[in-house]
Image (spheres, helix red, strand yellow):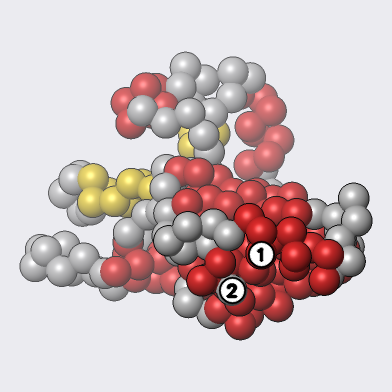
Amino acid sequence: MWQQFIDEHPDAFAFLSVAVDAHPERAAEYARPYRFPTAVDSANVLGRLFDFDVVPNGLLIDEVGALQFLHIGGFYLSRPDGRQQVEALLHADFATGDRPAHMSQESLELEVLRGQLVYDPQNSDLLAALGDALLREGHGVQAVAAYGQAVELRPDDWSLAFALGTARRQTGDVAGAVGAWRRALSLDPSNFTVRKQIWREEHPECFYPTIDSEWQKQQLAKEGYKR
């Protein structure tokens, strides 16, 4: 993919691939089909210099040798936002200090998960992990999308439906959250945690400012709750 991108932008930049491998001959086998040069960093000099322990990474050095951009982990051109990011870099005017928005980098956890999904996009565990990370960082809308894909891949997993509901609730979609939680409850009817989440949204007066335990008992009987 990089070779194709380079061919599409023949005069825009010079590209150097750096392989981190204690055995240069293995890197040579990988690099042989490509026309761009590949150096071998057997001693992990770049890793020590820029303090990274994951690959692939991206570095942009301008015409005077100044490092203008460093992307640690998940630097894949095959990512939907990866090509967008590289295109933005090529059109940036660093002399004016006007850095494109696409040059911002997410947390390393997100970058690594997105990178892994490039090669395994149907992995529901990776999608769930991405949803978890996005939710922790407050990216509710993106978390909904990640959990939604995971649910499609594992429709019988109550925990994924529950997580999807949690993400929807974070975005303010209460009806969508309750719908997802009801799906989770249908998959695991004895799950009291899921049931309480639904109650909190539909009967907040029974939880705030104090919890009405008697109401919960009556509601359990009304719903035919059984463990």
Q: Residue furthest toward the bottom?
A: 175
- Residue 102 on image: x %, y %: 35, 67
Residue beneath disc 1: 215
The amino acid beneath tag 2 is: His
- Residue 193 on image: x %, y %: 70, 53
The amino acid beneath tag 1 is: Trp
Pick whichever, 137 or 94, lies toward us: 137
Dot 1 falls on a residue whose secondary structure is: helix
Q: Is the residue under label 1 in contact with that under label 2 (CB below 8 Å)? A: yes
Residue drawn at point x = 66 percent, y = 64 percent: 215
Dot 2 falls on a residue whose secondary structure is: loop
Residue beneath disc 2: 203
Residue drawn at point x = 55 percent, y = 45 percent: 112
> Residue 197's image quarter?
bottom right
- Residue 127 on image: x %, y %: 68, 57
Indicate which disc, 2 or 1, sits on the residue closer to the N terminus.
Answer: 2
Left or right relative to 160: residue 172? left
Q: Residue furthest toward the left?
A: 96
Residue drawn at point x = 59 percent, y = 74 percent: 203
Crowd band around label 2 with a 10 angstrom C-alpha radius: few (<14), some (14–19), many (20+)? few
Quadrant of image for the N terminus: bottom right
Crowd band around label 1 with a 10 angstrom C-alpha radius: few (<14), some (14–19), many (20+)? few
